[in-house]
Image (spheres, rainbow, N blue to C red):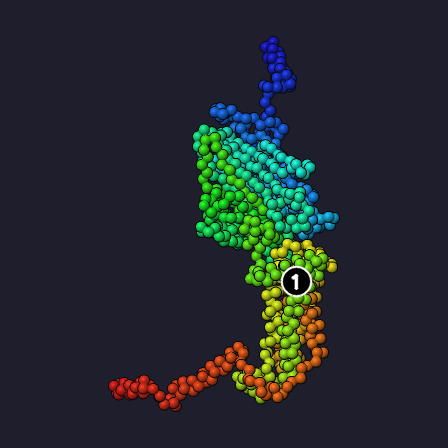
Amino acid sequence: MEQRRLLTFSVLVVVTWLGWFSVGPVLFPGLFPPPKPKQQAEDVLAPGEQPEGPAIAQAGNPGEAPVEPVPDQPEDPAEPESRLPNHPRQTVTLGSLDPATGYTLAIELTSTGAAVVSATLNDPRYPVAKNPDKLDPPPQLQLLGNNLRIRIDDEGARKRLAHTFDVDIAVIDDQFRNLAPTASLRTLDWELLETIDDPDAARTKATATFRIRSPDEQLEIRKIFRLNRVPPEQLQAGNIRDTSSLASQLDVELQIRNLSSKPQLATYVLQGPAGLPLENEENARKFRDIKAGFLSGESGSISAETLTAGQLTKDHENEEVETWSQPFRYIGVDTQYFAAIVVPAEPQQKLSWFSGSKPTVLKVNTEFRDRSDISVELTSVELELPPDGVVEHRFQMFLGPKRRELLETYEADAIIDFGWFAGISHVMVWLLDTFHGWGAPFGVAIIMLTMIVRGCMFPISKKQALSAKKMKELQPQLMEIREKFKDDKQKLAQAQMELYRKASFNPFAGCLPVFLQLPIFIALYQALNNWVDLRMAPFLWIDNLAAPDALSSMPELPFLGSEFNLLPILTVALFYAQQKMFMPPPTTDEMAMQQKMMNGMMFLFGFMFYHVPAGLCVYFIASSLWGMSERKLLEYLPEKPVDEEALKNKPPKKDGILARLFKQLQEAAEMSQQVEPQRGGQGTGNTPPTGPGQAGGKKGGGKRGKGRR
C-alpha cells in the first residue's frame, strides 16, 4: 500500500513538472528568461562571412533591443554576462562603386569593433592587377582588408587580425574581460546609432555613427565615419579625381564621453591601416612599407621616415621594434602604387595627441618577409575627461593612388620616392603624360620619349661612330706597337697613349653614351615603379607596362618563375647584335677574351632583365633599334676633307683629364725606377753611402766591432 502511494506521488510530480515547463513559458513568459549562451574560443568573422564554428558569444538574442543597466545597481555575481552589450552585428557601406555618384571609394564598416573592413576603389583605371577568373570587367582593387582571420585562444588573448580604426581603451576593456575572457572593444558589436544618406546620391550613405558603453555606464565611446565626394559641379572636370584629395579622404571622429559626475582618465590605442594589397608579387621590387612624416622643431618642417616590412619583421622577431615618440604630420602604410595614411585633422606642432606610434606586424610571411602584413598602432597621451564632458579627436585618412597632387594636401608627397635621379624621373613623367594627353598610348609615348633622348644624344653618338671608325684605322699601327713592346707593358701603354694623342683619339669616348644613358635608365625604372598611370597600361599584347609582359605560362624555372616573358629576350638579343655591330673584330688574344666576357655578360643580362617592367624593355628595344640605324646611316655620311695646312698651323691641343692622369702615373713610375737602384745598392754594399748619417753609421759600426775584440 505504501509503495503504491509513493509511486503515484512520483508520477504526479513528474507530470506536474513537465506540464509546468511546457505550458508555463506560454502562459507566464516573464517567469522564464531565455538561457544564456556559453562564451568560448572561436573564429572572428568578417561581416557577411559564413561561420565555420560557433559565432562569438553575445548576450541575449541578436534581434533584441539592448538592456540598459540601472546606474548604481548592485552587481549580480551569478549573471555577469548579462551586462555585455547586446547589439546586432551589422555592416554599413559608405560611398559607392559607381563612379558617376562622385565617390571614388566604397567603404565597408562593421559593427564588430566599429572598424573599417574594406575600402574599394571604383575608378575603372584601378582594377585588380591579376584577374585569374577572367572576369569582364575585372573586379576593382580593394585597398584595405586584404588579410586573413586569426583565432582567439582559450585564454582570451586578442589574436584577431586587426581592422583599420580598431580601438583599445584599457579602462573599458578590463571591465569587459572580467565579464567574458574574449570580450573587448575590438570583438564586441557596437550599436549602429545613426546613418545619414547623401542627398545628392540616391541610396548612398555618407555618414555612420557607432557607440558603445562601458559595463559600469561611466564611459561612452563613439566613432563617426564620414566619406567625402566630388561636388556635382566639379564632377565633369577631366582630372578632378587626380588633383582633388577630398574624394579620397575618409573623415573619422573618435569621441570619449564621461557620463559620470567625477573626472576620469583614459588612454586609447588606435589601429592604423591594415591589409593593403600586394600586386605582381613575383616581379615587384617594392612591397609594404611604413611611411611617416615627423614634425621637427618649431618651424614644423617634416622629416620623412620609411620602414620596410622585411626590416620590421626582423626587428619584431628580435623584440627590437622601436616606438616613435615624435609628433607626426602623417603616418600609414604604402605599397607600390597606393597609400593609406592617417593625418590628425588639427596641427600637432605644439601638443601631440599621441605619446607614441609603434609599427606592428599583423601577419608574418615566413617565406618572403618583405611581403608580411604590417600596420601601425597609435597610443594616445593620457586624456583627462571632465565630469559630463567629452574629448574629441578627428582624423583624416587618405586612401588612394600615390599622386603628387593628392599627397601634397597632407604634405606627404615624400611618400613617392623616385630615388637618386628624381629630377629626371619627374621630367620623364611629365613628357609621358604630355604625349598621352595628345592621344598616344603609353607604349607609343615611351617610344617618343626614346626618340627625344636619342635625338638629344645624336652629337655624342656621331662622335662615338667617328671614334670607332678611327679606331679601326689605327689598328695596323697598334699592332706594330704591340709587337715592338710586347715585353714591356709600361712602354706599350706609353706608346699607345702617344699614338692616341697624335691622332686626337679618345679610347673612352665610346663609353660616354652608356654613362649618359645610365641615369635615364634608372630614372625610367623608378618612374615605372612609382607612377600609377603606367599600372595596367596596355600596349600591343602587353596588359601592364609596369610589369613583365607575361606572354604565356610555363613550368616553374629557377630565377625565371612560371611566366614566359618575350620582351626581355628581344632586348638582350638586340644588345648582342648592337655589340657585334659596334665592336671591331679582335686583333689580339686579350681583345678576343674581352669580347667573350662581354658575350657572357649578355647572357647574365638576360636573367637581370627577365623581371623588369615591359615599359623599360620597350625603351631599350626602341633605343637599340635607333642606335643600330643611326650607326648605319653615319657610315654613308661624306667625310669632311682634312685641311693639312690648317692642321699644321693649329696650336697643340691641351691634354685632357685622361692624358694628364696618365702622365702623372708615368712620372710616378719613373721616380720609382730611380729609387729602386739606390735601395738595391745600399742593401748589397755596392753603392757608397751618400749621406752623413750613412757614413757615421758605418764608422760607428767599426767602433762597435773594435770594442767586441
Where does residue 422 sit, x and y in percent of width and height? 57, 60
Give whichever of 424, 85 is nearer the camera.
424
The residue tagged with tag 1: helix, strand or loop? Answer: helix
**Which residue sits furthest top?**
1
Quarter that holds the C terminus: bottom left
Which residue is denoted by mark 1 in the rendering?
Answer: 616
Q: Quadrant of residue 419?
A: bottom right
Q: Is residue 399 visible from the viewing direction of this image?
A: no
Q: Is residue 132 above or below residue 165?
A: below
Q: Is residue 35 visible from the viewing direction of this image?
A: yes
Where does residue 476 sit, x and y in percent of width and height? 64, 86
Please give the name of the residue rendered at 65% of the width and 37% of the height, measured from the top-left corner: 198
Where does residue 651 sit, x and y in percent of width and height? 55, 85
In the image, taking residue 666 as reference, residue 402 lies left or right, namely right
Quarter that holds the N terminus: top right
Please give the name of the residue rendered at 67% of the width and 61% of the height, measured from the top-left corner: 615
Please give the name of the residue rendered at 64% of the width and 70% of the height, measured from the top-left corner: 457
Where does residue 191 sit, x and y in percent of width and height? 58, 32
Give whichever of 210, 346 is nearer the camera.
346
Q: Amino acid at mark 1?
A: Leu
Please give the name of the residue rendered at 56% of the width and 47% of the height, measured from the top-left corner: 341
Q: Is residue 686 above or below residue 423?
A: below
